[in-house]
Amino acid sequence: MGSQTNGAPHTTTEPAEGALERWRESYGSTPERDVAFKTLGGIPVEPLYTEADLPVDRQASIGLPGEYPFTRGVYPSMYRGRLWTVRQFAGFGTAEETNERFRYLLDHGQTGLSTAFDMPSLMGYDSDHPRSEGEVGREGVAIDTVDDMETLFAGIDLGEVSVSMTVNAPAAIMLAFYVVAAERQGVPPEGLGGTIQADILKEYIAQKEWCFPIDPAMRLLGDMIEWCSRNMPRWHPVSISGYHIREAGATAAQELAFTLKDGFTYVEQAVERGLDVDDFAPRLSFFFNAQIDFFEEIAKYRAARRIWARELRETYGAKNPKSWLMRFHAQTAGVSLTAQQPLNNVVRTAIEALAAVLGGTQSLHTNSYDEALALPTEEAVRVALRTQQIIAHETGVTNTIDPLGGSYFVEALTDRMEAAAYEYFRRIDELGGMVEAVKRSFPQREIANAAYDLQSEIDSGRRIVVGVNAYTEGDDDDTPLHRVDPALERKQIGRLQAVRARRDASAVEHALAEVKAAASAQMNLMPALVEAARVHASEGEIVEALQSVWGSYTETPVF
Amino acid sequence: MSDSQRRLRIVVAKPGLDGHDRGAKIVARALRDAGMEVIYTGLHQTPEQIVATAVQEDADAVGISILSGAHMTLVPRIVELLEREGAEHVLVTVGGTIPAEDVAELKARGVAEVFAPGTSTQEIVEFLRSAAGESSSEAQAEAAARGS
């Protein structure tokens, strides 16, 4: 509160006990609505918060933006200095179609690119593999070889644009394709800026796109992080992701806890490999969901920054203040979108995006209103993009830094989220750490239980979802849908087979043998992967080479 | 449901390459809580694996959950393979993001019902009780005995 305000002088002490008692009495005399007052994640919410709910040491817990523990934001100026990056995730069909969508987004004011890969690419299958049938280019772009990667970014200067790639199990292979595609544009690895998701733990926890057993997958990630820290100083080699954990059904507190614990696990692995924490921690970034419970989300982001800063400084001994900063990307919640009355999703997305902005995000993807039905149309993507621009330029929320800082409720909820996260850290440590907890399906089970509980609330009508279990009249099903042309699958298979026909087969064979040798020999795999990319080995061939050494993975499901 | 009635046996199946198993697991648990025998296949199953499970488990119904966009390739294949294995009595239902025009096509190809996002678990339980209950031969005999 400003100390030099005009008007009547007022005190800032806690409300007198007498006044609070008077309010309690009058509140108690009015009946409450018959609903559960709790957050989406089940945290009970009091009718009123007061100064008594603020943290005891306000300066240490809340502080100032750009200062430890960064509760109020990672930068001193936040959006007064620079707005968040508008980063819409896109990808479908072959690299040619997605390249067109990328250029469309850049023409409409998008400031960074984000690549969605199709399911076969995420699982390490080539487009002509029998398991890929019907899946090629459906939910993202099909990338089989370095040639596809080159087409994907044709006409886009990779030395200029920041590119994000949402790929995990085969991330190291896709990064090798990207490095070689850039090399052909004349851009060296050190000139590349962007992010590759590569968060393999959350795959076993939630997203479930894997190629290898957990231990070799962790080693491959370690190789990539190490290689990037030496060769790609501008690159973020892992985006520690709560998004998919949340989409799979986690509560906000579970998203926070499991994501941070995954992050600590990567830090520990890199330190064990002999890297100095300050050599790579500044390049770690995060990716969170933006769900519909407005204040719970804001509290989650604020708690995340504070915990990360504290643990990096106190537990992992990072000295560089940049190592303490949690920078994150946010995406509105796909799972909050309804197939019924799809235009309502524009409203949901706007509110979720606003939560991410008030929570201090560095970049943002807003979902399109038709995504519970299909991949978005161009029109729906435009509305999603405009939603961010309206928040940025019309609402005024960017005029001041962390406008909710000091809110009795937001600060109390931030503390509550933080405590819930530490409780999960303790339980995971008891199981022997995150890798062991994942092997024992601990986070998987917690998430499945939370998802089931929420569904039970919705099914019983205890939680209202507008258009789904209440206010259901007026649903229209004439929303125009984006259709992926099935001919694109044949087109992509043709592209892949043309590459196979014109490449040097013996060079490929040799490169794949080198990949196997590196996998067996415990040497860093990245140089062998880059070489395999250079001679046009396909993703599927490289994955098979690695699987011949490491094996594959089958989950024991819990529900 | 009378105690003598055979418990419905339902295979909940995840074909395709997508890892979206939230819906499949919720439905599996809801069916189990409703007293059905549930066999969940786990992720990334081929149509052949799913049909083998359905036949081996003597399933009354296969509930397919798919969000990868490959439903028009994979679902008809499951229906055809069930027929080929002489298991055409097994009821096939689908849940996921399925566009309306594909729903009509899938039903024409032998899918009993397609559950859109937002369907309650009670609706699914009730549908299976009435539809799979009818198609299961023992339940049919019992229904005949009751004269209904």
Image (tube, coloured by chain):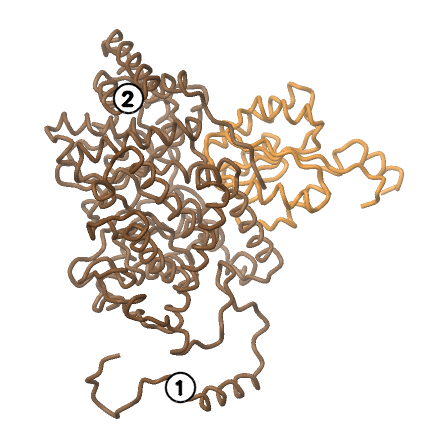
Say above or below: A461 vs A366.
below
Please name the residue that numbered disc 2 is placed on.
A523
Say above or below: A97 vs A399.
above
Please name the residue that numbered disc 1 is placed on.
A15
Closer to the camera: disc 1 or disc 2? 2
- Check contact, mark 1 vs mark 2: CB within 8 A: no
Q: Chain of mark 1?
A: A
In the rendered image, is residue A66 in sight? yes
Say above or below: A47 vs A515.
below
Residue at horizontal 42 percent and vertical 59 percent from the top: A292
The secondary element bearing badge 1 is classed as loop
Sequence-first tag of 1 and 2:
1
Q: Left or right: where does residue B36 sit relative to residue A437?
A: right
**Chain B appears what colour?**
orange
- Disc 1 and disc 2 on one polypeptide chain: yes
Nearer to me, A51 or A31: A51
Tell me residue A522's x, y (percent): 32, 21
Residue at horizontal 44 percent and vertical 27 percent from the top: A213
